[in-house]
Image (cartoon, rainbow, N blue to C red):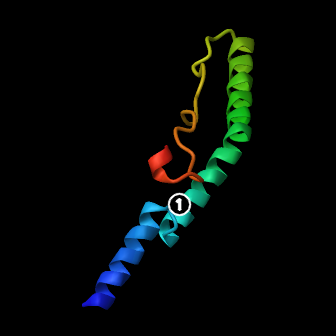
Amino acid sequence: KDGAYAKVKEELDALLKRRHPEQRAADSAMQTFYKQLPEAQKRVDAIIADHAKRKKDLGLQPVLNEAKLAKEKQFDTLKPRSQW
């Protein structure tokens, strides 16, 4: 009984401190996403600009105006959740 309690307490502690293996994997994926986001947004903006130029050259109105890939980062996954 005490062993099971200790195991649950340890897992809860890991979850609260964002040290659980699944949380670490998710945090790593989020960090990678936010690191790559500016470059991806530049590519999207270039595609939209090319689209607008082609449409304008054809005498048409552009269909695409802008696209935002994601909102600004709302939290820092390196900090404990209590500090978000």
Looking at the picture, tell me which residue is in the foreground, 55 or 3.
3
Looking at the picture, tell me which residue is in the foreground, 55 or 13.
13
Most extreme residue toward the left is 1
Q: How many marks?
A: 1
Residue 48 drawn at (x, y percent): 67, 26
- Relative to 38, 82 lies left or right: left
Q: Residue at x 40, y 74 (%)?
A: 11
Most extreme residue toward the top is 59
Residue 34 drawn at (x, y percent): 64, 45
Residue 79 drawn at (x, y percent): 56, 51
Query: For mark 1, what is the residue?
Result: 26
- Relative to 45, 27 lies left or right: left
- Relative to 2, 57 lies left or right: right
Dot 1, crowdedness within 10 Å: few (<14), some or many (≥20)? few
Looking at the picture, tell me which residue is in the foreground, 10 or 24.
10
- Mark 1 residue element: helix
Q: Residue at x 43, y 61 (%)?
A: 16
**What residue type is disc 1 on?**
Ala
Q: Quadrant of the N terminus?
A: bottom left
Q: Residue at x 66, y 41 (%)?
A: 37
Looking at the picture, tell me which residue is in the foreground, 34 or 75.
75
